[in-house]
């Protein structure tokens, strides 16, 4: 049952492309998926590109997958240590009618609409509640650090200048466009 449903989810995802969301099963294990979510436009996460991993149980869709960010994310509902996500639809709010696209869409929305009353990351929740300026600075710095690490991985000998915010936004738009094609 789970294998067939995951194949259906993949077909649905390919047929109904959503801007800023992409996912596919690993080549040798349909129960392990890799996904990319681009930060929602006009949000503090806008220039970020986030990798996730979804691990599906044998009885999916009766039980939800485990989902975690591979990319470091500073967010009230994401465990800093391992990237696991604390969101209702992956816990008590799960329904077998949810598919991979619905899960990823919900996580993308969670980035801009956290629930600080049910925190996985207490520090992020407190900053979100009490000091939004510092919260936003931490997110911006985390995204910049991720871009810097990617740039270093791409070419350690590159002497090009550091990308500014406009360049990062342009790169994200290009990535969004490539994901949706």
Image (cartoon, rainbow, N blue to C red):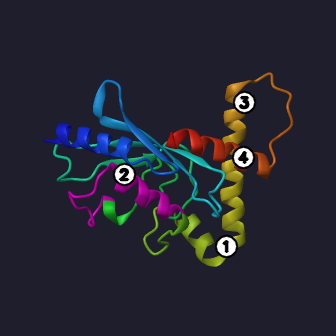
Q: Nearer the viewer, residue 139 or 106?
A: 106
Residue 152 picture quarter = top right
N-terminal of the pair, mark 3 or mark 1, is: 1
Where residue 150 appears, x then y in whole percent?
Answer: 67, 34
N-terminal of the pair, mark 1 or mark 4, is: 1
Disc ID at residue 101: 2
Label 4: which residue?
A: 170
Dot 4: within a 10 Å radius of its alpha carbon, few (fewer than 14), some, or many (20 or more) residues?
few
Examine the rendered structure and indicate whether residue 151 appears above or below residue 118: above
Disc ID at residue 132: 1
Cα distance between the residues tagged 4 and 3: 19 Å
- Specify start and end residues of the magenta stretch as a single range: 90-111
Furthest residue toward top: 157
Q: Secondary structure at mark 2?
A: helix
Examine the rendered structure and indicate whether residue 84 appears above or below residue 131: above
Mark 4 or 3, closer to the camera: 4
Cα distance between the residues tagged 1 and 4: 25 Å
Disc ID at residue 152: 3
Mark 3 or 2, closer to the camera: 2
Dot 1: within a 10 Å radius of its alpha carbon, few (fewer than 14), some, or many (20 or more) residues?
few
């Amino acid at each position: 049952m789970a294998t067939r449903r995951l194949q259906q989810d993949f077909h649905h995802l390919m047929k109904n492309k959503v801007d800023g969301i992409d996912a596919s099963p690993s080549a040798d294990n349909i129960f392990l998926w890799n996904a990319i979510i681009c930060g929602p436009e006009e949000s503090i996460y806008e220039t970020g590109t986030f990798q996730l991993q979804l691990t599906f149980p044998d009885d999916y869709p009766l039980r939800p997958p485990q989902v975690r960010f591979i990319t470091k994310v500073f967010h009230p509902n994401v465990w800093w240590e391992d990237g696991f996500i604390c969101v209702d639809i992956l816990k008590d709010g799960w329904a077998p009618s949810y598919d991979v696209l619905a899960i990823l869409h919900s996580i993308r929305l969670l980035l801009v609409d956290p629930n600080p009353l049910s925190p996985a990351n207490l520090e992020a929740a407190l900053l979100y509640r009490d000091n939004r300026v510092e919260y936003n600075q931490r997110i911006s710095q985390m995204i910049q650090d991720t871009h810097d690490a990617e740039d270093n991985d791409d070419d350690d000998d590159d002497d090009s200048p550091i990308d500014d915010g406009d360049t990062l936004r342009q790169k994200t738009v290009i990535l969004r466009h490539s994901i949706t094609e």
